[in-house]
Amino acid sequence: MTLYLLCLLLFCIGLYGVLRKRNLVKMIVGLGIIEYSMNLFFVLLGYRVHGRAPLDARNQDILNMVDPLPQALVLTSIVIGLGVMALIIAIAIRIYEKYGTFDITKIKRLKG
Amino acid sequence: MNNTLIPFFVIIPLASAFLISFIGKFAKRIIIDALSCVSYLLLFVFSLYAVSLTHGAGGMPLVYTVGGWAPPFGISMVLDGLASFMLVTVNLIALCVIIFSLRYMERYTGKPKFHTLFALMVAGMNGVIVTGDLFNLYVFLEIASLSSYALVAFGTEAEELEASFKYAIMGSVAASFIFIGIAFLYGFTSTLNMADMAHVLSNKPATWVIPFVSVLFFMGFGLKAALVPFHAWLPDAHPSAPASISAMLSGVLIKTLGVYALARIFFNVFGITPQQSSVLMFLGALSMLVAVVLALSQWDLKRLLAYHSISQIGYVVLGIGLATPLGILGGLFHLFNHSVFKSLLFLNSGAIDYVVHTRDLKEMSGLKEKMPVTAQTNLVASLSIAGIPPFNGFWSKLIIIFACIQSGHGGYAIAAVVGSLLTLASFMKVQKFAFLGELKEKNKNIREAPLSMTVAMVVLAVICIGGGFLLLPSFRFFISEAVQVLLNGNEYSSLVLGAVGR
């Protein structure tokens, strides 16, 4: 249970970074923390205490096995996260070229 | 077998994206355009065929098991009435928009990149529609969103980059809420297949998990659908994109990623409860009214249209949230109608932008004599969105209002009428300032937009005029089978699992 709570804490830290920070780079770092926390959470769901790797071997009784599916899914999710992150960083670099700043309060041509 | 058709809705756009990015560097422009047009034409024909297939199957879904792994172990793709209805909507708009962009996108450099990203976006949306697996839905949703972030920033001007950054951050946070919701559902049911999940959930006692996951999904998909408390990114992102992309984003992207996914999960997997449906109705009515009031004070034509997208999504969600047969019929019919007339309106704004080089309503006036086709199609679309008979928007709004009264939600019916009147007012403003009045001196020498752009607009305008005929008994199966899928609720699981023989 403690692990899940720490995971939630990590998520909240990331959300704080995205919502409250004024620097574009810090917002991106916050987004990265959110992604790590959710991947961690999904892997934790499949974890069993003293579980072994989910390999099918002959002459062995597999009693306590770690769930392999979340690991496969998290791998996909990491790749997606990488794509999103690369795109957002590229956009942030172009924004810096146009506006000359990373400060979100000075990048305000749109009204919302 | 008929069900081998299903993966092609994802394969065709993916293959065309790959080919175009591969040959885009050295091939002639016309080859790339032709390849793109042919693939969307093929997709549209396939989606019409899919409608006839699902009609012929008589309410039974067609299931394709990827790699031959039967559910719940493998990924399955499901084609039922709702999926084929959405496929027709998406691919029809994609075809019209790509015809429009043949000339319009000449203004931007890197047109092959546009075609690649556009094809990826269509692949993502078609994937979201046909998939029967919850994690697969998330993957396709991210493919579609990722390419839409890039497309919003396509012009790489300051405003477009700013809008794209905002959209990308909010979209990613929404996606992470959806991901955590899926993780909770997997932990609770030990399955990811939607049909199997519905089966497991119906046998489990009610706990805190489903309400909690519902909240996560309301936030995640609500942000993708731009419902009112989560709408802040849309009025920036949609106007900043090139007009053909705005047409695609407002026309189908927010509906596929937001409303369709929401409806599919809440109706077919969870089996909607009165609490969830009342939340949907409240969010719908709120977006309907708040966004239309904000739209009234806009002078930027595309920004005004973007606010109306939020407002019209409110009608769709209100209709679907009623969860009565009539309400869902109205909601889905309005979804189809809105994607037609809103993409038409955005294409009109693109044509004006192409000719007059402005988006400000005060800068354009009297365009009617110089741009007759744009003016006439815009009139049709404006009357449709405002709900004037006999255009298609009138019928769907009428059905939604009747459904509200029928299920005893008179307040929502009044809100719908008020929203419709305010919509009419703001489109009167567009007509008055853009098309009527004196022609400006500097605009004396403008000409009508090129042929490929007007063709796309005329086709959409004809659908706007004829859209009401879809309610006639002989064409009605197109929508009513989609309605039936949502009404079936949890039975979705036995239908899908039955179709693969389990």
Image (tube, coloured by chain):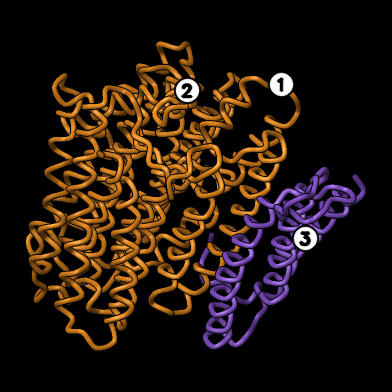
Q: Which residue is located at x 27 percent, y 46 percent?
A: B5
Q: Is B229 on the left-hand or right-hand side of B71?
A: right
Q: Which residue is located at x 11 percent, y 43 percent?
A: B462
| Label disc, if present, on residue A16 of the rendered structure | 3
Query: Distance of mark 2 from mark 1, alpha carbons?
Result: 20 Å
Q: Which residue is mark 1?
A: B206
Tag 1 secondary structure: loop
Q: Where is residue A9, by image quadrant?
A: bottom right
Query: Distance of mark 1 from mark 3, alpha carbons?
Result: 32 Å
* Chain letter of disc 3 in the image: A
Amino acid under label 3?
A: Tyr
Amino acid under label 1?
A: Ala
Q: Which residue is located at x 39 percent, y 25 percent?
A: B485
Q: Which residue is mark 2?
A: B494
- In the rendered structure, the colour chosen for chain B is orange
Work out whether residue B124 can be spotted.
yes
Q: Where is residue B218, by image quadrant?
A: top right
- In the rendered structure, the colour chosen for chain A is purple
Q: Which residue is located at x 47 percent, y 34 percent?
A: B264
Where is residue B72 drawn, in percent x and y?
A: 54, 37
Q: Where is residue A21, by image quadrant?
A: bottom right
Q: Are marks 3 and 2 on the same chain?
A: no
